[in-house]
Image: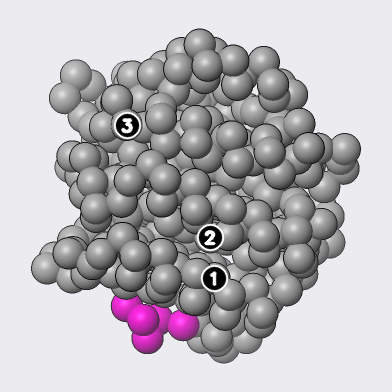
Amino acid sequence: MTVLYTDPLFQKHDTGKHHPETARRLSAIVEHLDKSGLTAKCAAGTYKPLTEAQVARMHSAEQIQTVMQMAERGGGSIDNDTPVSSESFRVALAAAGACVAAVDAVMNGPQRNALCLVRPPGHHATPTQSMGFCLFNNIALAANHARTTHQLSRILIVDWDVHHGNGTQDAFFEDPEVAFLSVHRYGQGFYPGTGAANETGTGKGDGRIFNEPIRFGTSRKDYLTRFSSVLEKAATLVKPELVLISAGFDAHAKDPIGALGLEVEDFVEMTKRVLDVARTHASGRVVSCLEGGYNLEILPLAVQAHLEELLADGK
């Protein structure tokens, strides 16, 4: 069974009426999975929110204090894209805690994979700056936990959100133990502007960053070919003991923010290819954490397709 992490608490991060990263994203997903019967096929994950000290393993004290104090004042905005409400700090600690707990679940077994339906998303949050809808970097905190608690030294993060995971890249740019692969829309000022192919890491982390920038208008076939190629390259080099997915679904053709032309079946194919890598190198151990995806009709369908593949692999 796939371990599924959901909590109504994650909907209490209030971004306002017109922000695309809305609580309705999660409610639409959860309602759809319940109606489809998929929720009942999963094991319910349990978790504890992270403490400030745990978050400080990957984020600066100043960054943590900024989010906490803004929430205590009733809310505000870190930047034009990143609102904070009175509950946001508490929710962000919980979201990161769920992703960390998922690592424990798949490492300790018997389940081999997990899906974390959390918000706020995390992959734009750098070690010193919350940005791009993200407060703390859920996937980076999960990867660091895998390394420090489970003594893993070969971890692969696969980020297929339409936006480059600049925060995750920054966190591990000099790190030889956590490799980062991102396939993302690039060029013409598309957010966040990072993720060029020549950004490959530095120092001991040189060669452990794998960026596959995709230009708008690239065909679905070419997208999947390039995704498979860079994934194979990364997997062959890293031979990961654990695979983490920053699962954004905003590269879908109908997404109002990303619109890179993908269809739901493309996320199925990418999930299958990541699971193949995990079976080959990591005993099937995969933790998938929700990032973007802002079309409220398409997002539940894409998550359903992704989860169906996780469930099929766990049998």
Amino acid type, residue under disc 2 in the picture: Val
> Does 103 lie within the magenta span?
no
Question: In the image shown, does 3 or 46 lie closer to the viewer?
Answer: 3
Q: Residue at x 28, y 69 (%)?
A: 214
Residue drawn at point x = 34 percent, y = 39 percent: 293
Q: Where does label 1 land, which residue? A: 231
**Three-letter amino acid code of the residue under disc 1:** Leu
Q: Which residues are magenta?
A: 195-200
In the image, residue 269 sits, relative to residue 85, either above or below, namely below
Quadrant (top left/top right/bottom left/bottom right) for the N terminus: top right
CA distance separating discs 2 and 1: 8 Å
Instruction: Give the residue pinned by disc 3.
Output: 298
Among the 4 quarters of the image, the one containing residue 57: bottom right
The residue located at (69%, 21%) in the rendering is 41
Across and down, in percent, residue 123 comes to: 44, 52
Residue underneath mark 2: 158
Graded by Cα atoms within 10 Å as few (under 14), some (14 to 19) or many (20 or more), the crowding at tag 1 reads many
- The verdict on residue 197 being magenta is yes
Q: Residue at the location (65% across, 46% down)? A: 287
Q: Tell me the SS state at disc 1.
A: helix
Q: Are marks 2 and 1 in contact (CB under 8 Å)?
A: yes
Compute the Cα span from label 2 to label 3: 21 Å
Label 3, label 1: how far apart the Cα atoms are: 25 Å
Please name whichever residue, 186 or 120, is drawn nearer the observer in this view of the structure: 186
